[in-house]
Every structure is written in C-alpha cells, then in structure tokens.
Image (spheres, grey):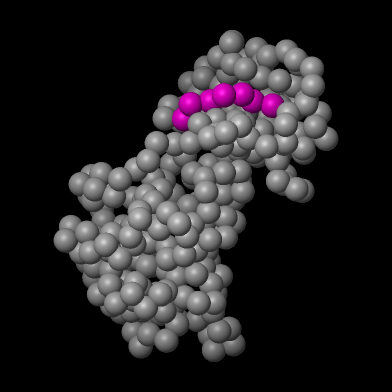
Amino acid sequence: MSKRDGKKNLRGRAGRMQGGRGSGRASQGQVRLWGRHAVEAALKNPARRHRKLWATREGIASLDGELPADFPVEYADGADLARLVARDAPHQGLVLECEPLEDVHLSEILDEDPDGLLLVLDQVTDPHNVGAILRSAAAFGAAAIVTQDRHAPPEGGVVGKSASGALEVVPWVRVVNLARALEEMAEAGYWRIGLAGEAQATLGEALPTGKVALVLGAEGEGMRHNITAHCDALARLPISDAMESLNVSNAAAIALYAVATR
C-alpha cells in the first residue's frame, strides 16, 4: 500500500475533547501504546481492535493516513498525555488504548514459515530489550519471536515504543514450556543454535543452510541449563576481548544479520 493510499485509512475528523483526564492506567484487559511509530502501526494493523486515541493536534497531524470519521479521539495537551503513560515516556502526542493481539500458536508459525528463522528468548524480561529485538526481527525477516509466557514482559507501551511499530508486524509466540517448544522446532526441521560466549565455534561457523532457531538467554545469567541442552549447537559472536559481552538486543541484531547474509 502506498503512502497515498494509506492516507485514506488513518487521519481525519478526530473526536471532540470530552472533558476530564484519563485514569493514568489502561482499562482492564486493554493495552496502552504510545509514540508515533507504535501508534501508527497499531492503527494500520487490521488485527488490532482499537478503543480510544488521546492526542495533541500535532500528534494527529504527524500520522501517515486518516482516521475514520467516527474514530474515538480525545484531544489533550502533552501534560495530560504524560499522565497516561509510563513515567517520562516519550509519547510524541499520541496515546492509544486497544485490545491485546490474539495469541499466536507455535504450530501456526512452524506450518507457515518457508524461510525458517525464529528467535527464541529465554527469560529476557526487560521490555526495552524485547521491543528492540522485535524491531531487529522485523528488519531481518524473522518469522516470529518465541518466549516463555511467565518470564517475558507483557504486551504494552514500553515494548511497543521500543519496537517502533514491529509489535504489529512480527508474531510473538508465548509458550508455557520453552524446552518443549524447542523440541517442536526440531521436529519441524529447525537447527537450534544457542548463543553463548563460552562456545568454541563462531556463529558463522555454526550456521547451517536450512531452518534456524536462534536462542538467546537473559543478560548476565544467559540461557538456563535445560534450554542449552535443547540446542543442537552453541555459538559465539566474534567480539573483541575488550568486551565481555553485548546487550542481548544488540547480540540479537548481529545474529539476525548473520543469518540473513549467510
């Protein structure tokens, strides 16, 4: 869809200021997103059900496209919008409340992924890191990221802002048992490579030609032993001895590049 075509779908007659401020938190079961890229991507995502948009007039004007005439918008100033988001979050004049995306099952991705590139995160809990990883996953064509439901951040504004729109693009599979999910990947023909600084082989040396699932652990602790045991190979990034390790989101971006250019 061209930008010209997109203009028909986003910006238009915004709502009227209805008086009063927001509650400062999302309604029960809802997701609150902020920032131009995150909000614009959510508005363009047909799978996302929207509830309400709070915005400055400048924020509305920054959107690429037009909102439907009856879209629920409440104009507010920047200070009021700041009360709706995380502390000191850069909302850029746009705060959207919407419903969470529908769950994505691993079997759907395994059945539909022709290129075979998955990113598995073992207890990466920082929403900034997960958002940045989603952004890199979108940039390098990963089919999905896979996390354990209990040890990953919730879908929300911090992830969405850090993902810069990728939250709406890259499927996020949340599983109960990450080890079992890795077994399912193996059964579907994936070669599972865990990134570990102590590995002998570099990632370039360990990469096969077929389907790949890259596995990354949390900063500091790395992958859990059970997850390491479910990898077909361990590999390291060839970084200088001057640095012990990289931030997990940076490591993910480099690893995704390596797979994309093998």
Quadrant hosting residue 102: top left
Quadrant hosting residue 187: bottom left
**Residue 38 forms part of the magenta stretch:** no
Compare residues 223 and 118 and report the one nearer the observer. 223
Compare residues 40 and 121 and report the one nearer the observer. 121
Task: Give the residue at x 76% y 16%.
Answer: 17
Q: Give the dominant element type of the magenta stretch: helix, strand or loop.
A: strand
Segment tinted magenta in the rendering = 48-54
**Residue 51 forms part of the magenta stretch:** yes
Q: Position of residue 41 (x, y in %)?
A: 52, 35
Q: How many marks?
A: 0
Q: Is residue 154 visible?
A: yes
Up the image or down, 57 lies above or below 24; here it is above
Task: Give the residue at x 37% y 41%.
Answer: 103
Quadrant (top left/top right/bottom left/bottom right) for the C terminus = bottom left
**In the image, is 224 to the left or to the right of 43?**
left
Quadrant hosting residue 205: bottom left
Up the image or down, 3 lies above or below 8; here it is below
Quadrant (top left/top right/bottom left/bottom right) for the N terminus = top left
Task: Give the residue at x 83% y 35%.
Answer: 79
Q: Position of residue 180 (x, y in %)?
A: 27, 62
Q: Is residue 211 visible?
A: no
Task: Give the residue at x 48% y 52%.
Answer: 134
Compare residues 214 and 254 and report the one nearer the observer. 214
